[in-house]
C-alpha cells in the first residue's frame, strides 16, 4: 500500500531538495520569516473580523467567507464579497500590506529555487543516491571507466567527486565538486549509502598515491562496508593501501606489463583480454551468485550446465574470499559460492553487489 509513496519520498531528487532546504535553513534568520508569517495571519484576521462585523449579518458562515475574501484579496484573486465603504478601504489596505508580505515570502521561495539550480550546476549539491558508485578523482582511467559503466548490464548510477570548476564527466554522471578526503564532500556524494567507491589518482606521481590513501581512510571512516577499488601508480605503495583495508588494488602499470609480456609470447591475448573485460564485441566478465539448483555439482557438471542454459563459460569459483581458478575435477561448489563467468550479458544471474569479507 505504501510502496509507491515510499519510492516517491525516497527518490534522489527529493533527497537533494531536502538537503538544500536543510542547508539554507541553517543560514537564514528563522525569526524573520516567522514574523512575516504571523504578521500575515494577524492582518488577515483583523481584515476578516472588520468586514464580518461591518458588512455581514455576523454568522459563522459569514465569518468563514470573510476569511476567504481576505485571503483571496491578498493573493490578487479578486472577490465581490465586501462591497461597502468599509470593505473597500480594508481591501485597499490588504492590497498594500498583505501583498507586500506575500511577495516577500514568494521572493524567498524563488531565491531558494535559483540557489538550488546554481548549486546543482556548480557541483555544490548532494547526490541523494543509494547503492551507487562513487568515483573519487579523475584521470584517463576514470574517463574510460565511466564509459564502461555506462554500457554495463548493472546500470549503476555514478557520482563523481572531483575538485574542478566544471564536471569532466558525461551529463549522466552526477558531479560533486570537492576534496576526495574531506568528510562533508564525501557525504554529499552519498558515500555512506554507496555500494562501491573507486579511487583514481589525479596524475602519475607518488603524491597522488598518498592523496588516494587519505581518500580511502576517509571513506572507510564513514562507511567501512563500502567496497573500495583503488588504482595505484607505484607498486611499492600497495602495502600501505592494504593496511588501509582496500578491497581491490589495481596497479595499472604492472597489469599492462604482464599483458604485454603474455601477448608477446602468445599473439592475440591482448585482444582477447580486452574484449572480456570491456563491453565491446563478444562476451564480458561477470561475477554472479551460484544458482541454488547447482549446489553440490562438480566443476565439469557446473560448467556444462552454465554453457548449455546460459551460454556462459565458467572461469573461477570464489569461496570465503578466496578465488579458485581452474580447480581440480573433484572440486564441488557449495551454497554461498560466487562464480566468475564470461557471458554475452548478465541474463538471469544474480549480480554480486555486497562486499565479500576477506578471511
Image (cartoon, helix red, strand yellow):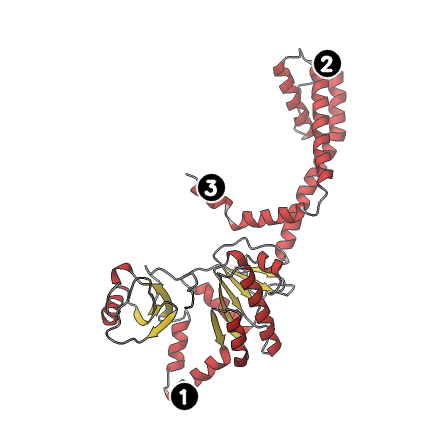
Looking at the image, which residue is at 51% across and 56% down? 193
Q: Could you say whether the residue bearing mark 3 is in a helix, strand or loop? A: helix
Marks 1/3 in contact by CB < 8 Å: the verdict is no
Looking at the image, which residue is at 66% across and 50% down? 115
Marks 3/2 in contact by CB < 8 Å: the verdict is no
Q: Could you say whether the residue bearing mark 2 is in a helix, strand or loop? A: helix
Tag of residue 54: 2
Left or right of 20? Residue 262 is: left
Q: Work out which quarter of the rendered image holds the N terminus and state it.
A: top left
Comes first in the chain, label 1 or label 3: 3
Left or right of 185? Residue 101 is: right
Counting from the top left corner in percent of width and height, residue 242 is at 50, 73
Residue 108, placed above or below residue 121:
above
Q: Could you say whether the residue bearing mark 1 is in a helix, strand or loop? A: helix
| Residue under numbered circle 3 | 5
Mark 3 to mark 2 CA distance (whole Å): 47 Å
Q: Work out which quarter of the rendered image holds the C terminus and state it.
A: bottom left
Comes first in the chain, label 1 or label 2: 2
Residue 107 in which image quadrant: top right
Counting from the top left corner in percent of width and height, residue 278 is at 42, 71
Looking at the image, which residue is at 67% across and 44% down? 110
Amino acid at each position: 500500500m505504501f510502496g509507491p509513496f515510499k519510492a516517491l519520498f525516497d527518490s534522489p531528487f527529493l533527497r537533494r531538495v531536502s538537503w538544500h532546504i536543510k542547508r539554507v535553513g541553517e543560514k537564514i534568520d528563522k525569526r524573520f520569516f516567522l514574523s512575516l508569517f504571523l504578521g500575515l495571519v494577524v492582518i488577515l484576521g483583523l481584515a476578516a473580523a472588520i468586514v464580518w462585523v461591518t458588512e455581514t449579518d455576523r454568522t459563522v458562515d459569514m465569518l468563514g467567507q470573510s476569511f476567504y475574501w481576505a485571503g483571496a484579496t491578498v493573493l490578487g484573486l479578486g472577490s465581490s464579497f465586501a462591497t461597502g465603504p468599509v470593505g473597500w478601504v480594508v481591501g485597499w489596505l490588504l492590497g498594500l500590506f498583505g501583498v507586500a508580505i506575500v511577495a516577500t515570502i514568494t521572493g524567498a521561495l524563488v531565491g531558494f529555487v535559483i540557489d538550488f539550480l546554481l548549486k546543482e550546476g556548480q557541483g555544490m549539491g548532494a547526490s541523494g543516491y543509494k547503492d551507487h558508485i562513487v568515483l573519487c578523482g579523475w584521470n584517463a582511467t576514470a574517463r574510460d571507466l565511466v564509459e564502461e559503466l555506462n554500457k554495463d548490464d548493472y546500470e549503476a548510477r555514478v557520482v563523481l567527486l572531483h575538485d574542478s570548476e566544471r564536471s569532466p564527466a558525461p551529463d549522466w554522471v552526477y558531479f560533486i565538486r570537492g576534496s576526495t578526503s574531506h568528510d562533508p564532500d564525501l557525504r554529499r556524494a552519498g558515500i555512506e549509502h554507496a555500494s562501491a567507491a573507486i579511487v583514481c589518482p589525479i596524475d602519475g606521481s607518488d603524491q597522488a598515491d598518498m592523496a588516494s590513501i587519505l581518500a580511502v581512510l576517509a571513506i572507510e571512516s564513514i562507511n567501512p562496508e563500502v567496497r573500495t577499488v583503488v588504482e595505484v601508480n607505484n607498486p611499492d605503495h600497495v602495502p600501505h593501501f592494504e593496511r588501509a583495508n582496500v578491497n581491490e588494488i589495481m596497479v595499472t602499470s604492472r597489469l599492462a606489463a604482464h599483458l604485454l609480456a603474455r601477448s608477446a609470447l602468445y599473439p592475440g591475448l591482448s585482444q582477447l583480454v580486452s574484449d572480456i573485460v570491456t563491453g565491446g564485441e563478444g562476451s564480458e566478465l561477470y561475477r554472479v551468485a551460484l544458482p541454488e539448483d547447482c549446489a553440490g555439482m562438480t566443476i565439469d557438471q557446473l560448467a556444462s550446465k552454465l554453457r548449455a542454459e546460459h551460454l556462459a563459460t565458467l572461469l573461477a569459483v570464489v569461496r570465503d574470499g578466496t578465488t579458485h581458478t581452474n580447480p581440480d575435477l573433484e572440486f564441488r561448489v557449495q551454497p554461498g559460492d560466487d562464480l566468475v563467468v564470461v557471458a554475452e550479458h548478465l541474463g538471469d544471474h544474480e549480480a554480486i553487489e555486497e562486499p565479500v569479507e576477506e578471511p
